[in-house]
Amino acid sequence: MSAARSVVVMSAARSVVVMSAARSVVVVGASLAGFSLVRTLREHGHEGSITVVGDEPHPPYDRPPLSKEFLREDVDIALSDESATEASWLLGRRAVGITTTAAGPGVTLDDGTQLAGDSLVLATGARARTLPGLGSLRGVHTLRTVDDAHAIRHSLRTARTLVVVGAGLIGSEIASTAAAIGIAVTIVELCPDPLTAVFGPHIGPLCAAMHDPHGVRLLTGVAIDRFLGDEHVNAVQLTDGTVLSADAVVIGIGAVPNTEWAEDSDLHIDNGFVTDSQCRTSLPGIYAIGDCARSYDEATGVHHRSEHWTNATVQARIAAAAILGAPQRPTAAPYFWSRQYGRMLQFAGNCRPTDEVRFVDGDPSTPSLTALYERDGAPVAVFAIDNPRLFTRYRKHIERLTPIPTS
């Protein structure tokens, strides 16, 4: 494989690095999506230079363990294979703007350096959503990065009580982890029906009901009014006047795509970098993948943004094929999973609130179960708890019945 080559041009006291390989690629974002793109490009024989910029100082790592076992102890979360050594990694560097030059699309970094190549891929991810106007007491956390996870782990080592804000998948996983180490946990959720937007009105309540048997208190239809304490949080006051003891607080209310740095460009940005089904943005040669991308889904006919692990890897494969001009392979139906209270939850497909739900194995009273979502008599999604074999069978069945467009 040929080595990556570059030419450095000095201009206005700034270095401009122009990749000179025939198909040079610049990637902004060094997490799963960016790492997966590098790996896929090399697997498909791409020999041009690849430069990856990451704002964290850490090499690429896997995020799913951060809300689970990593909160208890160090586990190996590194993302690494041979392809990682076949790219230039600029870590601890932040992109601050999009550039378009004769050398191709590129970015300006926070130190003034400019990178340009034949293709530019935006994989800047998302940041944790916060609760504005509630102060900055110690012991109040969000979870997005490995540094966040280390801080939460430190708090949990001495905490007796924990308040989790948000009963989504991340909040539920954190609550499960904390309860397992003996912490009294209360989840506060503004929505009266947690997870209904994710799993529908039949399965959402079933998932929310998993907390109570494990001693985790779930309060719904109420919001946080303020955090109490001097320098460190010691309680949370709710909008209904309830005061909850809290040695630590973790806010898990979703994420915001990291797009502000590119707002001065001509990119179409609307809750993410808007792309077509091939991950192409509104500017030639620029692609967006992962949590920061709001891509067009030909199966549903709408643009949407997905923050799931599998979406990052799937979009990396789609973008790599588009960059290389390779044929697109059919993509699988959307899929994600969660581990809570020692149980494995899996979902695949696209569901709507009006879908019929039929239990094909087990029921809400059994240790394991599998439920099929049906629309007009046809299966469109499947959900399972601790039943991976049957889940996989129905997942494949759904994908055979619903061909996924390839162009």
Image: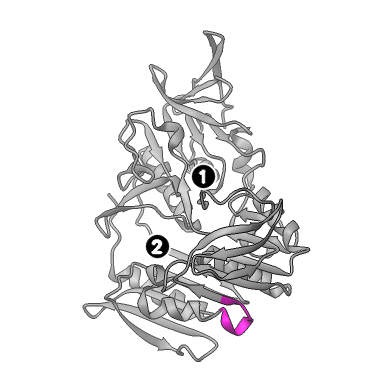
Picture coordinates of residue 306, whole percent (x, y): 42, 55
**Disc 2 to disc 1, how far (Cα)?**
23 Å
Q: Which residues fall within the magenta stretch?
A: 211-217
Picture coordinates of residue 336, whole percent (x, y): 47, 65
Q: Which residue is mark 2?
A: 334
Most distant residue in the front direction: 241
Picture coordinates of residue 166, whole percent (x, y): 51, 64
Residue drawn 39% across and 38% down?
287
Residue drawn 71% across and 72% down?
183
Task: Residue type at mark 2: give it.
Answer: Pro
Q: Which numbered dot is residue 43? A: 1
User: Residue 384, relative to residue 140: is it above or below?
Assistant: below
- Residue contact between numbered discs 2 and 1, judged by CB atoms under 8 Å: no
Near mark 2 (Cα within 10 A), the count class, few <14, some 14-19 or many ≥20, is: some
User: How many numbered badges does the structure rendering display?
Assistant: 2
User: Which sits in the foreground, 178 or 327?
Assistant: 178
Task: Residue type at mark 1: give it.
Answer: Glu
Determine if residue 50 is in view.
no
Q: Residue 212 magenta-drawn? A: yes
Residue 118, picture quadrant: top left
Instruction: Tell me the quadrant of the picture where the N terminus can be found.
Output: top right
Determine if residue 85 is in view.
yes
Picture coordinates of residue 148, whole percent (x, y): 65, 51
User: Which sits in the foreground, 298 or 239?
Assistant: 239
Query: Along the polypeptide, which appears first: circle 2 or circle 1?
Result: 1
The secondary structure type at the circle numbered 2 is loop
